[in-house]
Amino acid sequence: MLKIESARVIVSSPGRNFVTLKIETNEGVYGIGDATLNGRELAVASYLQDHIVPCLIGRDAHRIEDIWQFFYRGAYWRRGPVTMSAIAAVDMALWDIKAKVAGLPLYQLLGGAARDNVLVYCHANGKTVEETIEDALKHKEMGYKAIRLQAGVPGLKSTYGVPKGKEAYEPADADIPTENLWSTEKYMRSCPKLFEAGRQALGDDIHLLHDVHHRLTPIEAARLGKDLEPYRLFWLEDSVDDDNQENFRIIRRHTTTPLAIGEIFNSVWDMKTLIQEQLIDYIRSTIVHTGGITHLRQIAHFADLFNVKTGFHGATDLSPITMACALHFDMAIHNFGIQEHMPHSELMESIFKIGYTFEDGFMHPGEAPGHGVDIDEKEAAKYPYKRAYLPVNRLEQGGAMTNW
């Protein structure tokens, strides 16, 4: 038996907080998994250390499905981002171990390559439309075939998704949540102008994407989708609050702009209606917050039945471990759509040794056994945890809370 002998939680902040689980076996083979939950990192670390790790010791590392079901069903209190992120870390580490024992890259154990490489999209941001287009043209020169456009809203001091300066964007910006103001009316007027300029500057062959960050009502989202139809978006992401899946029935009736959602989902039950009624075109779940590869395989296969493709979250609030696992997953599934790509900093990649590569708008997970990412624990220990939160928004008129 390939027995689990130890498991430990590593919390580090090389520019931002990451939670990593390392599982070691009696044969000297180890695997690592990502358990990062932006703004709630220590909650997941505690869940792992206090509840999951003691139950792992002595188990057969090869029994991935059984271990997944044990932690999902055995806790009685199911789902939620903390629980599913913790289970995901175990799952990623066990798949890493199994692939290392087999001497194969992870995607080979998931069915082998269904494509030669993985199409990714980048982020182009700016305080103004002009700045965003300038940034997008730079990314086009880098080889990206798909670009997400986000610009500041005229009349608002700040906009989530847009960096304050020239530095790389990091959404978790303070140790107590920053409170910003938001105006739907101003946003609805400016957004179509951004994509009119984007299509003119970038041409017809570049895929354009946009993230609304859950800020609209269903009828507002329907109007925005209709306004953006002339610019043929690859998708319109997170247009409404996703707590009520039926919201998307209204949007679907009024626009042909493709719809994407799901980066904050953590179970197939969060998206069942959306997929089964074909109310979305892309599911945006991430491996780390959706219970790992084992559960995400179920979701992808279910989505495939209803012509829904994947477009997994890939921001820098996920560690390189999640990015690697996503790329292996993307390589193997039939209904892959696109993969988000926000490159990690050199500092982060000095802690996490990566094996995946980017070239001309596509990525590849690499051929190393396992998922191809390792962690330098001594280097990680140099960067202790720092509390950081995402900003929140209040409406400009009235001051009521809204989403990011």
Image (tube, rainbow, N blue to C red):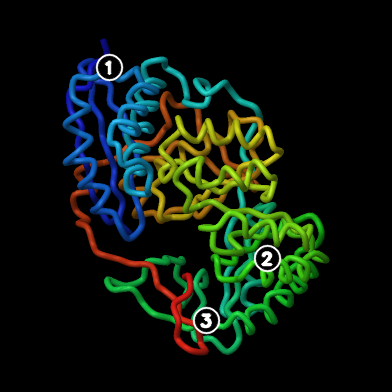
- Label 1 close to label 3 by CB (< 8 Å): no
Residue 156: quadrant of the picture:
bottom right
Residue found at the far top of this picture: 1
Mark 3 nearby-residue class (10 Å; few <14, some 14–19, many ≥20): many
Q: Amino acid at mark 2?
A: Leu
| Structural distance between the alpha carbons of marks 1 and 3 | 51 Å
The secondary element bearing badge 3 is classed as strand
The residue at the point 19 percent across, 37 percent down is: 8
The secondary element bearing badge 2 is classed as helix
Check residue 324 in the rendering and tell me which mark sits there, or answer none. Answer: none
The residue at the point 61 percent across, 64 percent down is: 239
Residue to which mark 3 is pinned: 182
Q: Position of residue 105 (x, y in %)?
A: 47, 24
259 relative position to 312: left or right: right
| Structural distance between the alpha carbons of marks 2 and 3 | 28 Å
142 relative position to 229: left or right: left
Query: In this view of the protein, which residue sits in the foreground, 282 or 377?
Result: 282
Q: Residue 329, relative to residue 19: is it above or below?
A: above
| Structural distance between the alpha carbons of marks 1 and 2 | 51 Å
Mark 1 nearby-residue class (10 Å; few <14, some 14–19, many ≥20): some
Q: Residue 57, relative to residue 303: is it above or below?
A: above
